[in-house]
Amino acid sequence: MSLSRMIYLALAIWGAIHPMYYFVQWFQENGWDIWAMVDAWHVNAASSGLVWDLTIAAIALTVWIIVEVATRRNWGALVAIPATFCIGVSCGLPLYLFLRTAPVR
Protein backbone atom coordinates (compact mmCIF):
# COMPACT_ATOMS: atom_id res chain seq x y z
CA MET A 1 0.00 0.00 0.00
CA SER A 2 1.34 3.41 -0.93
CA LEU A 3 2.13 6.08 1.64
CA SER A 4 -0.71 8.30 0.36
CA ARG A 5 -3.24 5.46 0.75
CA MET A 6 -2.05 4.80 4.31
CA ILE A 7 -2.43 8.50 5.10
CA TYR A 8 -5.96 8.59 3.61
CA LEU A 9 -6.95 5.51 5.61
CA ALA A 10 -5.49 6.95 8.83
CA LEU A 11 -7.35 10.24 8.23
CA ALA A 12 -10.62 8.37 7.56
CA ILE A 13 -10.26 6.45 10.82
CA TRP A 14 -9.33 9.59 12.73
CA GLY A 15 -12.21 11.45 11.04
CA ALA A 16 -14.61 8.77 12.25
CA ILE A 17 -13.36 8.40 15.81
CA HIS A 18 -12.43 11.92 16.90
CA PRO A 19 -15.69 13.74 16.03
CA MET A 20 -17.76 10.77 17.25
CA TYR A 21 -16.11 11.10 20.68
CA TYR A 22 -17.63 14.58 21.02
CA PHE A 23 -21.01 13.53 19.62
CA VAL A 24 -21.32 10.63 22.06
CA GLN A 25 -20.18 12.85 24.92
CA TRP A 26 -22.85 15.41 24.00
CA PHE A 27 -25.55 12.73 23.76
CA GLN A 28 -24.60 11.33 27.17
CA GLU A 29 -24.90 14.77 28.73
CA ASN A 30 -28.05 15.92 26.90
CA GLY A 31 -29.97 12.77 26.02
CA TRP A 32 -30.08 10.81 22.80
CA ASP A 33 -32.23 13.28 20.88
CA ILE A 34 -30.88 14.01 17.39
CA TRP A 35 -33.11 17.08 16.98
CA ALA A 36 -31.71 18.59 20.16
CA MET A 37 -28.24 18.15 18.69
CA VAL A 38 -29.32 19.84 15.46
CA ASP A 39 -30.66 22.73 17.53
CA ALA A 40 -27.32 22.90 19.37
CA TRP A 41 -25.49 23.14 16.05
CA HIS A 42 -27.39 26.37 15.38
CA VAL A 43 -26.84 27.98 18.78
CA ASN A 44 -25.11 31.00 17.18
CA ALA A 45 -24.13 32.41 13.80
CA ALA A 46 -20.61 30.95 13.92
CA SER A 47 -21.79 27.39 14.49
CA SER A 48 -24.57 27.78 11.89
CA GLY A 49 -21.97 28.96 9.39
CA LEU A 50 -19.83 25.91 10.12
CA VAL A 51 -22.83 23.58 9.76
CA TRP A 52 -23.65 25.07 6.36
CA ASP A 53 -20.01 24.97 5.29
CA LEU A 54 -19.83 21.25 6.07
CA THR A 55 -23.23 20.57 4.52
CA ILE A 56 -22.24 22.19 1.24
CA ALA A 57 -18.91 20.34 1.28
CA ALA A 58 -20.76 17.05 1.91
CA ILE A 59 -23.10 17.68 -1.03
CA ALA A 60 -20.19 18.59 -3.32
CA LEU A 61 -18.33 15.44 -2.26
CA THR A 62 -21.44 13.33 -2.91
CA VAL A 63 -21.84 14.76 -6.41
CA TRP A 64 -18.15 14.11 -7.11
CA ILE A 65 -18.41 10.52 -5.85
CA ILE A 66 -21.50 9.80 -7.95
CA VAL A 67 -19.97 11.28 -11.11
CA GLU A 68 -16.69 9.41 -10.66
CA VAL A 69 -18.36 6.12 -9.74
CA ALA A 70 -20.55 6.35 -12.84
CA THR A 71 -17.43 6.93 -14.95
CA ARG A 72 -14.99 4.53 -13.28
CA ARG A 73 -17.52 1.85 -12.29
CA ASN A 74 -15.94 1.66 -8.83
CA TRP A 75 -19.21 0.80 -7.08
CA GLY A 76 -17.58 0.06 -3.73
CA ALA A 77 -16.61 3.71 -3.42
CA LEU A 78 -20.28 4.57 -2.88
CA VAL A 79 -19.78 3.57 0.77
CA ALA A 80 -18.15 6.98 1.24
CA ILE A 81 -21.56 8.68 0.81
CA PRO A 82 -23.22 7.22 3.93
CA ALA A 83 -19.92 7.67 5.78
CA THR A 84 -20.05 11.36 4.86
CA PHE A 85 -23.62 11.93 6.03
CA CYS A 86 -23.66 9.54 9.02
CA ILE A 87 -20.19 10.35 10.36
CA GLY A 88 -18.96 13.48 8.60
CA VAL A 89 -16.88 14.93 5.80
CA SER A 90 -13.81 14.32 7.97
CA CYS A 91 -14.37 10.59 7.44
CA GLY A 92 -16.11 10.51 4.04
CA LEU A 93 -13.53 12.50 2.06
CA PRO A 94 -10.39 10.61 3.12
CA LEU A 95 -12.32 7.32 2.86
CA TYR A 96 -13.26 8.12 -0.72
CA LEU A 97 -9.68 9.15 -1.55
CA PHE A 98 -8.47 5.86 -0.05
CA LEU A 99 -10.95 3.87 -2.14
CA ARG A 100 -10.32 5.93 -5.28
CA THR A 101 -6.55 5.44 -5.16
CA ALA A 102 -6.75 1.65 -5.00
CA PRO A 103 -4.69 -0.05 -7.71
CA VAL A 104 -6.63 -0.66 -10.92
CA ARG A 105 -7.25 -4.36 -11.56
Image: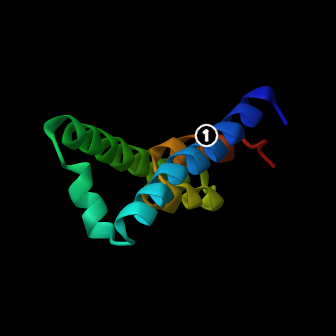
Quarter of the view holding residue 44: top left
**Residue 93 location (% of width, % of height):** 52, 42
- With respect to residue 3, does 103 lie above or below? below
In the image shown, does 53 or 47 lie closer to the viewer?
Answer: 47
In the image shown, does 72 or 99 lie closer to the viewer?
Answer: 99
Tell me: 65 left or right of 98.
left
Name of the residue lying farthest toward the bottom: 32
**Residue 102 location (% of width, % of height):** 74, 43
**Residue 101 location (% of width, % of height):** 69, 39
In the image shown, does 49 or 18 lie closer to the viewer?
Answer: 18
Which residue shows up at 61% across the image and 57% down it? Answer: 73
Quadrant into which the N terminus falls: top right
- With respect to residue 11, does 22 lie above or below? below
Which element carries disc 1, helix, strand or loop? helix
Which residue shows up at 58% across the image and 50% down it? Answer: 16
Residue 101 visible within the image: no
Which residue shows up at 74% across the image and 35% down it? Answer: 5
Name of the residue lying farthest toward the front: 29
- With respect to residue 80, does 36 lie above or below? below
Which residue shows up at 26% across the image and 65% down it? Answer: 36
Quarter of the view holding residue 37: bottom left
State the residue position of label 1: 97
Residue 89 visible within the image: yes
Q: How is the image coloured?
A: rainbow
Name of the residue lying farthest toward the left: 45
Total count of labels: 1
Q: Amino acid at mark 1?
A: Leu
**Residue 68 location (% of width, % of height):** 51, 47
